[in-house]
Image (spheres, rainbow, N blue to C red):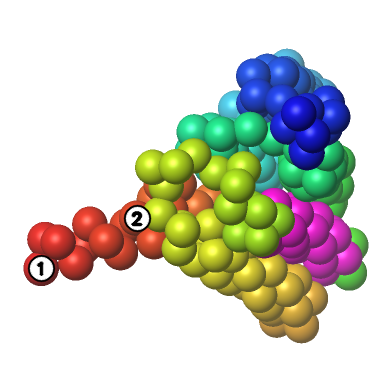
Amino acid sequence: MTGPESDGSRSDTARAVAFSDAIFAIVITLLVLDLRVPNVPPGHLLSGLLAQWPAYAAYVASYLYVAVVWLNHKAAYHRIRETDRGLHWANLFVLFSTALLPFPTVVLSHALQEHNRLDQRIAVVFYALVGAVLCASWLAFHHYLARHGDLVAERVDDRFFPAERVRPLVGVVLYVAAGLLGYLVAPLISLAIFLVLPVFYGVTSAGLYQLGSRTGRRG
Protein backbone atom coordinates (compact mmCIF):
# COMPACT_ATOMS: atom_id res chain seq x y z
CA MET A 1 0.00 0.00 0.00
CA THR A 2 1.30 3.47 -0.88
CA GLY A 3 0.19 7.00 -0.15
CA PRO A 4 0.17 9.33 2.85
CA GLU A 5 -1.66 6.83 5.02
CA SER A 6 1.17 4.28 4.74
CA ASP A 7 4.30 6.43 4.98
CA GLY A 8 3.94 7.34 8.64
CA SER A 9 3.10 10.99 7.95
CA ARG A 10 -0.43 10.62 9.29
CA SER A 11 -1.72 9.57 12.69
CA ASP A 12 -4.76 9.84 14.89
CA THR A 13 -5.36 12.96 16.95
CA ALA A 14 -4.74 11.51 20.43
CA ARG A 15 -1.13 12.64 20.90
CA ALA A 16 -1.74 16.10 19.46
CA VAL A 17 -4.71 16.65 21.77
CA ALA A 18 -2.86 15.36 24.86
CA PHE A 19 0.19 17.52 24.16
CA SER A 20 -1.98 20.58 23.50
CA ASP A 21 -3.96 20.10 26.73
CA ALA A 22 -0.70 19.98 28.69
CA ILE A 23 0.43 23.29 27.14
CA PHE A 24 -2.90 24.96 27.94
CA ALA A 25 -2.67 23.80 31.56
CA ILE A 26 0.85 25.22 31.91
CA VAL A 27 -0.16 28.55 30.35
CA ILE A 28 -3.11 28.97 32.72
CA THR A 29 -0.85 28.17 35.68
CA LEU A 30 1.68 30.80 34.58
CA LEU A 31 -1.03 33.46 34.35
CA VAL A 32 -1.79 33.32 38.06
CA LEU A 33 1.86 33.83 39.09
CA ASP A 34 1.54 37.60 38.59
CA LEU A 35 -1.10 37.83 41.34
CA ARG A 36 0.86 38.63 44.49
CA VAL A 37 0.25 39.87 48.02
CA PRO A 38 0.65 43.67 47.89
CA ASN A 39 3.67 45.16 49.64
CA VAL A 40 1.88 47.64 51.94
CA PRO A 41 2.22 48.78 55.56
CA PRO A 42 0.04 47.09 58.22
CA GLY A 43 -3.56 48.25 58.05
CA HIS A 44 -3.44 49.01 54.30
CA LEU A 45 -4.08 45.54 52.91
CA LEU A 46 -7.51 46.39 51.49
CA SER A 47 -6.27 49.46 49.64
CA GLY A 48 -3.28 47.49 48.40
CA LEU A 49 -5.51 44.72 47.05
CA LEU A 50 -7.84 47.22 45.38
CA ALA A 51 -4.89 49.04 43.81
CA GLN A 52 -3.95 45.84 42.00
CA TRP A 53 -7.18 45.80 39.96
CA PRO A 54 -5.28 46.02 36.63
CA ALA A 55 -3.58 42.71 37.45
CA TYR A 56 -6.98 41.11 38.09
CA ALA A 57 -8.44 42.53 34.88
CA ALA A 58 -5.47 41.36 32.81
CA TYR A 59 -5.62 37.92 34.45
CA VAL A 60 -9.35 37.55 33.75
CA ALA A 61 -8.93 38.64 30.11
CA SER A 62 -6.07 36.21 29.50
CA TYR A 63 -7.64 33.35 31.46
CA LEU A 64 -10.84 33.70 29.45
CA TYR A 65 -8.79 33.78 26.29
CA VAL A 66 -6.91 30.57 27.13
CA ALA A 67 -10.17 28.94 28.21
CA VAL A 68 -11.90 29.70 24.91
CA VAL A 69 -8.79 28.67 22.97
CA TRP A 70 -9.05 25.31 24.73
CA LEU A 71 -12.79 25.11 23.93
CA ASN A 72 -12.19 25.98 20.29
CA HIS A 73 -9.27 23.56 20.10
CA LYS A 74 -11.43 20.77 21.53
CA ALA A 75 -14.26 21.58 19.12
CA ALA A 76 -11.88 21.61 16.14
CA TYR A 77 -10.22 18.30 16.95
CA HIS A 78 -13.61 16.72 17.54
CA ARG A 79 -14.12 17.25 13.80
CA ILE A 80 -10.67 16.04 12.71
CA ARG A 81 -10.25 12.40 11.72
CA GLU A 82 -6.45 12.29 11.52
CA THR A 83 -3.47 14.61 11.41
CA ASP A 84 -0.46 15.05 9.15
CA ARG A 85 2.78 17.04 9.41
CA GLY A 86 1.23 20.22 8.09
CA LEU A 87 -1.59 20.15 10.63
CA HIS A 88 0.90 19.41 13.41
CA TRP A 89 2.83 22.54 12.47
CA ALA A 90 -0.37 24.59 12.31
CA ASN A 91 -1.30 23.30 15.76
CA LEU A 92 2.17 24.09 17.10
CA PHE A 93 1.73 27.65 15.83
CA VAL A 94 -1.51 27.90 17.83
CA LEU A 95 0.27 26.57 20.93
CA PHE A 96 3.24 28.89 20.39
CA SER A 97 1.05 31.99 20.27
CA THR A 98 -1.09 30.83 23.21
CA ALA A 99 2.02 30.25 25.32
CA LEU A 100 3.03 33.88 24.72
CA LEU A 101 -0.03 35.23 26.58
CA PRO A 102 1.43 35.29 30.12
CA PHE A 103 4.17 37.72 29.04
CA PRO A 104 1.99 40.55 27.64
CA THR A 105 -0.44 39.93 30.50
CA VAL A 106 2.28 40.75 33.06
CA VAL A 107 3.49 43.72 31.01
CA LEU A 108 -0.05 45.13 30.75
CA SER A 109 -0.94 44.68 34.42
CA HIS A 110 2.29 46.31 35.59
CA ALA A 111 1.96 49.22 33.18
CA LEU A 112 -1.61 49.93 34.30
CA GLN A 113 -0.52 49.93 37.94
CA GLU A 114 2.42 52.29 37.33
CA HIS A 115 0.12 54.97 35.82
CA ASN A 116 2.60 56.01 33.13
CA ARG A 117 0.53 56.94 30.08
CA LEU A 118 3.16 56.11 27.46
CA ASP A 119 3.98 52.75 29.05
CA GLN A 120 0.27 51.90 29.21
CA ARG A 121 -0.13 52.66 25.52
CA ILE A 122 2.87 50.51 24.62
CA ALA A 123 1.57 47.69 26.84
CA VAL A 124 -1.87 47.56 25.20
CA VAL A 125 -0.28 47.61 21.75
CA PHE A 126 1.97 44.72 22.80
CA TYR A 127 -0.99 42.73 24.16
CA ALA A 128 -3.01 43.47 21.02
CA LEU A 129 -0.11 42.33 18.86
CA VAL A 130 0.10 38.97 20.64
CA GLY A 131 -3.70 38.62 20.41
CA ALA A 132 -3.55 39.29 16.67
CA VAL A 133 -0.77 36.70 16.27
CA LEU A 134 -2.90 34.16 18.14
CA CYS A 135 -5.86 34.85 15.86
CA ALA A 136 -3.57 34.58 12.84
CA SER A 137 -2.43 31.15 14.05
CA TRP A 138 -6.06 30.02 14.14
CA LEU A 139 -6.57 31.46 10.67
CA ALA A 140 -3.68 29.31 9.42
CA PHE A 141 -5.07 26.28 11.28
CA HIS A 142 -8.55 26.58 9.76
CA HIS A 143 -7.16 27.43 6.34
CA TYR A 144 -5.08 24.26 6.35
CA LEU A 145 -8.12 22.16 7.22
CA ALA A 146 -10.17 23.96 4.57
CA ARG A 147 -7.52 22.93 2.01
CA HIS A 148 -7.14 19.36 3.34
CA GLY A 149 -10.68 18.05 3.72
CA ASP A 150 -9.38 14.46 3.77
CA LEU A 151 -8.21 15.06 7.35
CA VAL A 152 -11.71 16.04 8.48
CA ALA A 153 -14.26 13.56 9.83
CA GLU A 154 -16.77 12.42 7.24
CA ARG A 155 -19.76 13.70 9.25
CA VAL A 156 -18.48 17.30 9.07
CA ASP A 157 -19.93 19.55 6.39
CA ASP A 158 -17.38 20.50 3.72
CA ARG A 159 -18.22 24.16 4.27
CA PHE A 160 -17.44 24.12 8.01
CA PHE A 161 -13.69 24.85 8.09
CA PRO A 162 -13.72 27.24 5.12
CA ALA A 163 -16.38 29.26 6.97
CA GLU A 164 -14.40 29.08 10.21
CA ARG A 165 -11.68 31.29 8.74
CA VAL A 166 -13.97 34.27 9.30
CA ARG A 167 -13.72 34.06 13.11
CA PRO A 168 -9.94 34.44 13.47
CA LEU A 169 -9.91 37.05 10.70
CA VAL A 170 -12.38 39.12 12.74
CA GLY A 171 -10.06 38.70 15.73
CA VAL A 172 -7.02 39.96 13.82
CA VAL A 173 -8.93 43.07 12.72
CA LEU A 174 -10.34 43.79 16.19
CA TYR A 175 -7.02 43.29 17.99
CA VAL A 176 -5.31 45.64 15.58
CA ALA A 177 -8.13 48.15 16.15
CA ALA A 178 -7.80 47.68 19.92
CA GLY A 179 -4.08 48.40 19.76
CA LEU A 180 -4.62 51.55 17.70
CA LEU A 181 -7.45 52.83 19.93
CA GLY A 182 -5.46 52.08 23.07
CA TYR A 183 -2.43 53.94 21.79
CA LEU A 184 -4.19 56.90 20.18
CA VAL A 185 -7.21 57.35 22.48
CA ALA A 186 -7.25 55.48 25.81
CA PRO A 187 -5.74 52.19 27.05
CA LEU A 188 -8.97 51.27 28.87
CA ILE A 189 -10.76 51.01 25.50
CA SER A 190 -8.30 48.29 24.55
CA LEU A 191 -8.84 46.52 27.86
CA ALA A 192 -12.60 46.46 27.23
CA ILE A 193 -12.05 44.91 23.78
CA PHE A 194 -9.64 42.37 25.28
CA LEU A 195 -12.41 41.29 27.68
CA VAL A 196 -15.14 41.15 25.03
CA LEU A 197 -13.28 39.17 22.37
CA PRO A 198 -12.94 35.96 24.44
CA VAL A 199 -16.69 36.12 25.06
CA PHE A 200 -17.26 36.22 21.29
CA TYR A 201 -15.00 33.22 20.75
CA GLY A 202 -16.65 31.38 23.63
CA VAL A 203 -20.16 31.90 22.27
CA THR A 204 -19.06 30.80 18.79
CA SER A 205 -16.80 27.94 19.93
CA ALA A 206 -19.02 25.44 18.08
CA GLY A 207 -18.36 27.40 14.89
CA LEU A 208 -20.01 30.27 13.04
CA TYR A 209 -21.25 27.92 10.32
CA GLN A 210 -22.94 25.60 12.81
CA LEU A 211 -24.29 28.57 14.81
CA GLY A 212 -25.77 30.04 11.62
CA SER A 213 -27.34 26.69 10.70
CA ARG A 214 -29.03 26.40 14.08
CA THR A 215 -30.31 29.97 13.87
CA GLY A 216 -31.70 29.28 10.41
CA ARG A 217 -33.51 26.16 11.56
CA ARG A 218 -35.10 28.03 14.46
CA GLY A 219 -36.25 30.76 12.10
Q: Which residue is mark 1?
A: 219
Which residue shows up at 61% across the image and 59% down it? 146
In percent of width and height, residue 96 lies at 84, 40
Which residue shows up at 46% across the image and 58% down it? 158
Rendered image quadrant of residue 138 = bottom right
* Amino acid on which disc 1 is placed: Gly
Q: Residues within 10 Å of mark 2 (few under 14, many from 20)?
A: some
Which comes sooner in the sequence, label 2 or label 1? 2
Above or below: residue 7 compared with residue 111: above
In-image side of 207 versus 128 (left or right): left
Above or below: residue 53 compared with residue 34: below
In-image side of 168 versus 200 (left or right): right
Q: Which residue is mark 2?
A: 210
SS for dot 1 = loop
Residue 133 colored magenta? yes
Indicate the quadrant containing the C terminus: top left, top right, bottom left or bottom right.
bottom left
In percent of width and height, residue 12 lies at 65, 24
SS for dot 2 = helix
Q: Magenta segment range?
A: 121-143
* Magenta-drawn stretch, dominant element (helix, strand or loop): helix
In-image side of 216 versus 34 (left or right): left
Residue 98 visible in the shown view:
no
Which residue shows up at 22% across the image and 57% down it? 214
* Amino acid on which disc 2 is placed: Gln
In-image side of 125 versus 156 (left or right): right
Residue closest to the far left: 219
Q: Residues within 10 Å of mark 1 (few under 14, many from 20)?
A: few
